[in-house]
Image (tube, rainbow, N blue to C red):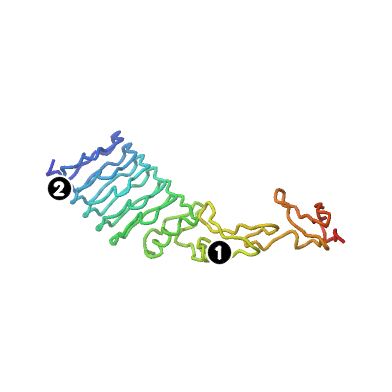
């Protein structure tokens, strides 16, 4: 099939595309695979289609695209992947696509686009990302930075709460930078599960910066106040080493 210019196999029940399916289609310009049941795109599925201009993969069941799945497609300008089941765009998914002009990823379930996933798409002018619930915690920073540098594209991308990613401000993401973390009273900066850097407080101290304590409102006299670690209740320890629960007002328990 070396002289084929267009292949249209849309509206079938195709689930998999073997790697060598289009191996000899060197003159192929348009490939229509939409409205099937394709579940994944592996590396080298479309390799060596150097003349390919348009690739339609929308309305499938694609949940996985392997790294470097679209390499060696120097002429590709239009790539349609909308209405699939993608959740994460891994690094090096869209690289080596120097002519890519339009990329449609709308209508998936994408929460994360990893760093370097979009590569150096110098000719990309249209990126459609509507109807994806992006997770706008610290993991959004690489993609947010990429969008800020290309403010004219990708404006449809929204966080899961409906806020436009492009509208996030650097001040909102400062909490993700370890250099901006400051803890007091012996607290330490540690990474949390969502990528933020938070204070791990010790002893009686609590709060965002380890500046809060129930003991600041109680007077234990000559005793010491501490916060019981299980229920967080302030206690006074006097000379007899026996803890006494502080009342709900200032009161001297260790005269």
The quarter in which the C terminus is drawn is bottom right
- Report crowding for label 1: few under 14, some 14 to 19, many 20 or more residues within 10 A (C-alpha): some
In front of the other: 98 or 255:
255
Secondary structure state at the residue bearing disc 1:
loop
Image position, residue 241 (x, y; %)? 80, 53
In front of the other: 240 or 79:
240
Which residue is label 2 attached to?
27
Which residue is label 1 attached to?
181
Image position, residue 87 (x, y; %)? 42, 46
Secondary structure state at the residue bearing disc 2:
loop
In the rendered view, does 197 fall on the left or right side of 250? left
Vertical order, 81 against 181 (above or below): above
In the rendered view, does 96 fall on the left or right side of 155? left
Residue 48's disc number: none
In the rendered view, does 24 fall on the left or right side of 163? left
Vertical order, 126 against 35 (above or below): below
In the rendered view, does 208 fall on the left or right side of 51? right
Which of the 4 quarters of the picture holds residue 39?
A: top left
In front of the other: 120 or 33:
120
What is the tally of numbered marks visible in this picture?
2
Task: Kindly give the residue lying farthest to the right in the view shown.
Answer: 255
């Amino acid at each position: 099939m070396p002289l084929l210019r267009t292949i249209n196999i849309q509206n079938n029940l195709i689930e998999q595309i073997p790697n060598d399916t289009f191996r000899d289609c060197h003159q192929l310009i348009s490939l229509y695979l939409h409205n099937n049941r394709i579940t994944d795109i592996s590396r080298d599925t479309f390799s060596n289609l150097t003349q390919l201009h348009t690739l339609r993969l929308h309305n499938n069941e694609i949940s996985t695209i392997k790294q470097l799945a679209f390499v060696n497609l120097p002429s590709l300008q239009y790539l349609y992947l909308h209405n699939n089941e993608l959740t994460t765009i891994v690094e090096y998914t869209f690289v080596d696509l120097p002519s890519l002009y339009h990329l449609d990823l709308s209508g998936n379930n994408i929460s994360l686009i990893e760093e370097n996933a979009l590569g150096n798409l110098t000719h990309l002018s249209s990126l459609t990302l509507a109807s994806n619930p992006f997770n706008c915690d610290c993991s959004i920073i690489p993609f947010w930075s990429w969008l800020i540098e290309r403010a004219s594209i990708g404006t449809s991308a929204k966080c899961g709460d409906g806020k436009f990613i492009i509208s996030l401000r650097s001040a909102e993401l400062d909490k993700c930078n370890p250099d901006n973390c400051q803890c007091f009273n012996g607290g330490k900066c540690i990474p949390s599960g969502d990528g933020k850097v938070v204070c791990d407080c010790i002893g009686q101290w609590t709060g965002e910066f380890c500046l809060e304590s129930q003991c600041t409102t109680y007077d234990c006299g000559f005793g010491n106040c501490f916060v019981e670690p299980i229920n967080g209740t302030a206690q006074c320890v006097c000379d007899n080493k026996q803890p006494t629960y502080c009342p709900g007002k200032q009161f001297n328990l260790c005269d």
